[in-house]
Image (cartoon, rainbow, N blue to C red):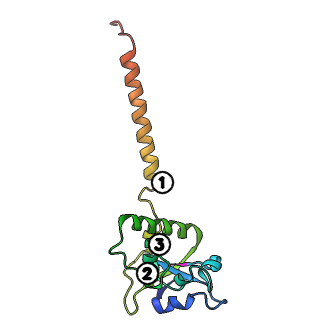
Amino acid sequence: MSRTFTASELSTYNGSDGDKPVYIAVKGIVYDVSAARDFYGKGGPYEIFAGRECSRALAIMKVDLAACNDDLADCTAQQLKTLEDWITKFNSKYAVVGKLTLEGCESQVDDPATFLRSSPFTPSLVATLAVVVLLTILGAYILYLDIKSPPHGEL
């Protein structure tokens, strides 16, 4: 994470200057989408997102200047899931170059990396759960074999 942007600073990365990168912000995280300048740059179908916070627009799937903001208060669970899917896509395709903050205020997000993980299941948790499941199955199989085997004589 290289820097913190205000909304007015972010707006200068709107794709109108071919020598500058194109940035968009989603949930306060600023992405360099220059690799998709045809989509987000001047004249592209999503140029309205360039240089702006566009969380709401992505959540409600609306390419509209009025929807380019961070207001998610009235979004449905499905819309929030859609936004998380977009974040996963951006994290896999584009570099994170900073975070967005309110002008004249300190950032509300101390560690933007918390938004980069789309799943609460860490690799170590998944591995632990897999081992527990396998041991449970093995234990059940051993118990099954013990029940099915003929009784043993006394020693």
Q: Please name the residue shown 64% across and 76% down the image.
A: 35
Measured as percent of width and height from the top left, residue 20 is found at 63, 88
- Tag 1 or tag 2, which sits nearer the N-term? 2
- Tag 3 or tag 2, which sits nearer the N-term? 3
Pick the front one: 60 or 94: 60
Q: Do the residues labelled 1 and 3 touch (CB within 8 Å)?
A: no
Residue at numbered disc 2: 67
Measured Cα–Cα span from mark 2 to mark 3: 9 Å
Measured as percent of width and height from the top left, residue 72 is found at 36, 75
Mark number displayed over residue 61: 3
Residue 28 belongs to magenta span: yes
Q: Is mark 1 on a helix, strand or loop?
A: helix
Res 27 visible: no
Which amino acid type is marked by label 3? Met
Predominant SS along the magenta part? strand
Query: How would you rate the neighbour count of disc 2 (Cα within 10 Å): few for under 14, some for 14-19, many for 20 or more?
Result: many
Measured Cα–Cα span from mark 2 to mark 1: 36 Å
Which amino acid type is marked by label 2? Ala
Circle nearer the viewer, 2 or 1:
2
Query: How would you rate the neighbour count of disc 3 (Cα within 10 Å): few for under 14, some for 14-19, many for 20 or more?
Result: few
The correct choice, above or below, for 145 with respect to 112 in the image is above
The quarter of the displayed image where residue 146 is located: top left
- Tag 3 or tag 1, which sits nearer the N-term? 3
Q: Please name the residue shown 42% across and 69% down the image.
A: 114
Residue 67 belongs to magenta span: no
Q: What stretch is highlighted in magenta?
A: 27-31
Res 97 visible: yes
Q: Please name the residue shown 49% across and 84% down the image.
A: 52
